[in-house]
Amino acid sequence: MREPVKSGRVAYGGAVPDAPDPIAEAHRQWSARWPEHADHMAAVTSVMRAQQLLLSLVEAALKPHGLTFAAYEALRLLAFARAGALPMGKVGTRLMVHPASVTNVIGRLERRGLVERRPSPDDRRVVLAAITPEGRELAERATAALHQAEFGLPGLTAGQAAAITGALHAVRVSAGDVQEGAARNGTVQENARREGGGRESDGQAGGGQADEVRGEGVRAGGGAGAP
């Protein structure tokens, strides 16, 4: 059995000799050829593989409810909205996806009677996506299923999950997705909301008007495909 190849705090290779980790093998190959880039390669590959695994686990929990994760996120976001409706453009901004993906997702939910589209009473050029009572009920059931599944991370403690969020926040800052300090500012806003009895102020909150969305939205980052 070959000796583990150590990088930082992670030991690659040799942990499960009969079933070697492909990422560990890739790291070994990079270390032999481009050692200065090996850790970055392994980090990116690990994140992409983890994304595949988690999406599979999350969608398995949502499948009995007939939802993909993209469709669930849209429903959950609309359920968070105080009026149960948001402009289509704002849905895309909140979920960080292309407008075409939003149109696709909302269209499929609409055909199931879970969401409806209607002109904004303030500006008829703006199309609102509004959750229906059936959609709200399904969002609650699907959320309970994801909570039971621990969002695909049943083996991790809350502290470990928070550490992952912190590590990935650094990646998002590096890529220009968010600004440094955004996570801390969000925590301050949440603490202020709790101290105020769970009600937001009439000003800006969570990056948008307080009368539109409660809290921060659904996810921290990433894209979503069509349901």
Image (cartoon, rainbow, N blue to C red):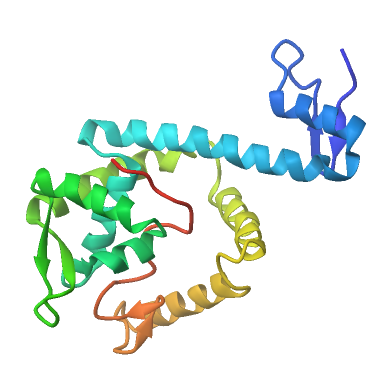
- In the image, is residue 95 above or below residue 160? below
* The C terminus - image quarter: top left
Residue 130 pos. (x, y %) = 14, 62
Residue 32: quadrant of the picture? top right
**In this image, 9 relative to 132: left or right?**
right
What residue is at 41 percent from the left and 77 percent from the top? 207
Residue 104 pos. (x, y %) = 25, 48
Residue 40: quadrant of the picture? top right
In this view, the residue in front, 42 or 213, is 42
In this view, the residue in front, 53 or 153, is 53
What residue is at 60 percent from the left and 51 percent from the top? 164
What residue is at 49 percent from the left and 74 percent from the top? 186
Residue 84: quadrant of the picture? bottom left
Residue 183 pos. (x, y %) = 55, 70
Residue 122 pos. (x, y %) = 13, 83
- In the image, is residue 94 above or below residue 104? below
What residue is at 71 percent from the left and 43 percent from the top? 43
* The N terminus - image quarter: top right
Q: How many labels does the image show?
A: 0
**In this image, 4 relative to 205: left or right?**
right
- In the image, is residue 90 above or below residue 25? below
**Residue 154 visible, this angle:** no
**Residue 227 visible, this angle:** yes
**In this image, 206 relative to 27: left or right?**
left
